[in-house]
Image (cartoon, grey):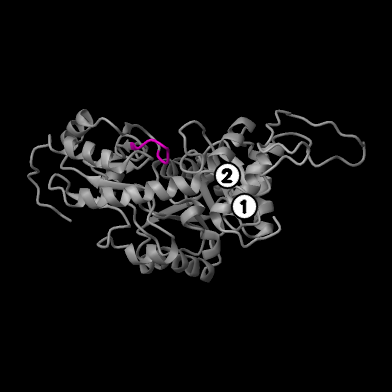
Amino acid sequence: MSDNNWSFQTKLLHNDAKVDRATGGVSVPINHSSTFHQFDVEEFGKYDYSRSGNPTRETVENAIAELEDGTRGFAFSSGMAAISTAFLLLSQGDHVLVTEDVYGGTFRMVTEVLTRFGIEHSFVDMTDLDAVRAKVQPNTKVIYMETPSNPFLKVTDIRGVVEIAKENDCLTFLDNTFLTPALQRPLNLGVDIVLHSATKFLAGHSDVLAGLAAVKDPELGQRLYKLQNAFGAVLGVQDAWLVLRGIKTLHVRMEHSSKSAQKIAEFLSKNDKVLEVYYPGLKDHPGYDIQNVQADGPGAVLSFKLEDGEAVKTLHKHLELPVFAVSLGAVETILSYPAKMSHAAMTQEARDARGITDGVLRLSVGLENVDDLIRDLDNALAKLPQPKKNLVR
């Protein structure tokens, strides 16, 4: 683009994917070619085989690089494919330090897969910088952040962790799925690799599985590209097109859903059937101040705690609007059950240690009228018995 000072919401629409240079079409062509004819024996063209590069996939890769203020982007077949490929930067004998409040799929990758290759790991409360510093080992090569975290929306001081990483000559990865570059741009805070499950808010319509990554350092980008090409878990062209379509409405979706999430969090925090609400937009959230400094908003995801699993079953039975499902970040509101969905890969012991009880629910707020959502929640919560436990807000 000729002007790099356009606002974020304008860049979502006016970028390299704005028109097809060959035809003038305002929708990017879906290039299904798996291989590409070479017109010269000695010098090949830009594309040769779609695992290594495809025009449609390249468009979404360029888009995430621009939106994250990076130099290079990467599109993978899923969020976990992006995360797993980034972890391939590690070698036998290396150590990765991971936030303890992390997505269950990432937990499984670290504890069950990386260990098979002699890669060590430790979990830490990443809201405590002293604890992070104390947990860094001589062989620590990556510090892995997820902020706000899943499912308790804990907020990590990104700049603080980056400083510790640089002191110890290790890389920083950050899962930015919950906020997207619409609200948080980790590369500008010093993070080395930003990762996304683009299945969620970036695509936004519960109709695509995709992962994205972006880097600022070109040399690191080339290393990651070699792994992407070798590992091969790349995004298909139909899904790439769907992600591009979803990105166009990212700003308006995030703005609407975040405003609704704030109202719902405030409503839940006053309801006597709810033991605790986890949302960085609430002033009593421990990460409220840091969130306001490093991000442009608290996002559209919140979690809350009911007394027990029976209370969850009763709520589920009486709710009408939210989809009760795995995933988040869609146009429809999605209610998830971490203990049996996003964090089912964790052992019971690991969930207990993190406070992921059978009463914890996660709500990803969609585009419905917020008053309808609150009324639906209020009606369902009214069917719950009064909790025996003391409120812990």
Quadrant of residue 39 within the rendered picture: top right
Depicted 3 relative to depicted 351: above or below? below
- Determine which residue is flagged by label 1: 65
Q: Residue at x 47, y 68 (%)?
A: 164
Quadrant of residue 373 within the rendered picture: top left
- Determine which residue is flagged by label 2: 85
User: Residue 195 at what x, y percent from top left?
Assistant: 52, 49
Instruction: State which quarter of the image contains the C terminus.
Output: bottom left
Depicted 349 relative to depicted 144: above or below? above
Sequence-earlier tag: 2 or 1: 1
Q: Is residue 127 magenta?
A: no
**Residue furthest to the right:** 41
Res. 112 in view: yes
**Mark 2 neighbour class, 10 Å CA radius: few under 14, some 14 to 19, many 20 or more:** many
Q: Is residue 332 magenta?
A: yes
Which amino acid does the dot numbered 2 rest on? Thr
User: Residue 349 at what x, y percent from top left?
Assistant: 27, 43
